[in-house]
Image: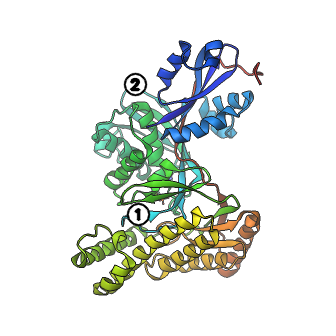
Amino acid sequence: MPAYCYFILCDNNAFYTGWTKNIKRRFKQHLHGKGAYYTKVHSPVEVVYWESYGDDKIARKREVQLKKLTHNQKINLSRGRLTNMCDRLYFDKYNYFVNSPGRVNLLGEHVDYNGGPVLPVAIDRSVSLWANRRNDQQFSVNALDMDQNVVLTLNSIESRMDIQGNPLPDWALYPAGVIHIAHKQNYQINGFDSLFKSNIPIGSGLSSSAAIEIAFAALLREFGMWKMDNLQLALLSQEAEQRYVGVNCGIMDQFASANGAANSALYLDTATLQWQILPLPKDVAIVIADSKIKRNLATSEYNERRASCEEALSKLKEFSPSINYLSDVSPQEFAKFGKNLAEIPYKRAKHVIEECQRVKLAAQALKSSNIVEFGKLMKATHASLRDLYEVSIPQIDTLVEIANAHRSCFGSRLTGAGFGGCTVSLVLQESADKFMDDIKRDYYLNTGSEIEVYICKASNGVTVQWRNQTSSLTDGKSPID
Ligand code: ADP
Ligand code: MG
């Protein structure tokens, strides 16, 4: 269930900060002197700002942070002043702002459609979505990065058209798909006017598409007051990508974008959907290196990998009928029965089965802050993606070799579906700048090509913020700061 942190402006010009599962009800309690001692003594005037999270655990943590802000920091947040000047332009026009992060997967590649465990991290690159609610069921979506706008209705979405009967551009399938699936599942749908942009590189393995889906799903949840947690939000968005966009994806990307946790990785069992937050050591940086090589063959190769996994699963089921996913097959069982598979399904299944074991070991390593062991597992994953799953390319292998040879690097590997895109490396924080300079230079010397390298911070999942644009909030010092 979504939970909110909020600021109430009180009659002494100070803020009261709290968290709740229902803002309207809570504000009424404050108005009647039954909310908190502070609002009993200083009458509440209005709610000037709130932000929502998928569950109350994160909201409670966030409340502690918000309570530590100074009066002026709270004013800045309420007015959207903490963002850059360009974004400020939109704050004046839109009440709602959604931030939905991309993700990088530390370990567990190509296992989320095989029931295996994964270890993604939501990152500080995200989709920014601004919106206002409408009183009808019309949706206007402006993709700032594409310089395109579409206007949709439920009917036009059903026939994959905009309101004028033009076919939808590819990018519009993501928001439209989320609206469509939510409508089919009988959720209350509210129209909106919106615009969005993103700094997640497209098609590089950092999941720009899921971040868009989760942004719009969170917005619709807010407007429709759906009682839905972030895991369900991810499942709805996955269904949109599978059934409306037409990509047969696993659940990891949407899950990470919805449920990310600051300074932590997420351990998700994609078969049971059980998950936990695993804090990352403070002295380790996550470095992304973007090869800028676009994944040309990705869709056909991805489908081929899925088909091989299915073939392996159905053959293995003949010997061990109780298995539902490749992730259920133990390495011992595979040693016994795997020889019955043809060469290609054998290699693909071997990767998946061993990768599942690596993720479990990696989670243990994280729990005991053993990053050296974690790094070794990342290196083994890369070798497996290269030799068994065959989704790497020579340039990415070169990049990974350069990174793994660096003394500050614990482990580096291809991340995402493969055939280009990004690598992820875990690096000693204090040497991260040098590491980035070194691999840039060495890759250029080896290949003559430039890469983009940056540090990603593990971040919280999707948030919705609301600002009261017509509030009586005035600048100035609070009597209590
Ligand atoms: P990724 O691995 O980055 O998720 P996908 O191929 O799954 O790659 O999704 C990429 C697609 O998502 C793009 O082709 C585009 O349709 C949409 N998309 C991503 N970022 C943006 C953006 N900033 N603006 C509009 N559409 C975007
Ligand atoms: Mg995607």
Q: Looking at the image, can residue 93 be seen?
A: no
Q: Residue at x 46, y 33 (%)?
A: 193
Identify the residue under disc 1: 112
Q: Residues within 10 Å of mark 1 (few under 14, many from 20)?
A: many
Q: Residue at x 55, y 69 (%)?
A: 293
Picture quarter with the C terminus: top right
Measured from the top left, where is residue 267 in percent x and y? 49, 59
Q: Looking at the image, can residue 380 be seen?
A: yes
Q: Residue at x 68, y 67 (%)?
A: 427
Labels 1 & 2 near each other (Cβ < 8 A): no
Decide if ligand 2 comes within 8 Å of the CB at mark 1: no
What secondary structure is marked by label 1?
A: loop
Q: CA–CA distance between discs 1 and 2?
A: 39 Å
Count the marks: how many? 2
What secondary structure is marked by label 2?
A: loop
Q: Residues within 10 Å of mark 2 (few under 14, many from 20)?
A: few
Q: Looking at the picture, does residue 170 appear above or below residue 228?
A: below
Viewer-proximal residue among 245 and 364: 364
Q: Please name the amino acid that badge 2 sits on.
A: Asn
Q: Residue at x 31, y 87 (%)?
A: 339
Q: Looking at the picture, does residue 319 appear above or below residue 47?
A: below
Identify the residue under disc 2: 135
Image-based side of 229 in relation to 283, left or right: left
Measured from the top left, where is residue 45 in percent x and y? 60, 14
Q: Please name the amino acid that badge 1 sits on.
A: Asp
Measured from the top left, where is residue 314 in percent x and y? 25, 74
**First reached walking from the N terminus: tag 1 or tag 2:** 1
Of discs 1 and 2, which sits in the foreground?
1
Q: Which color mode does the image show?
A: rainbow
Viewer-proximal residue among 68 and 240: 68
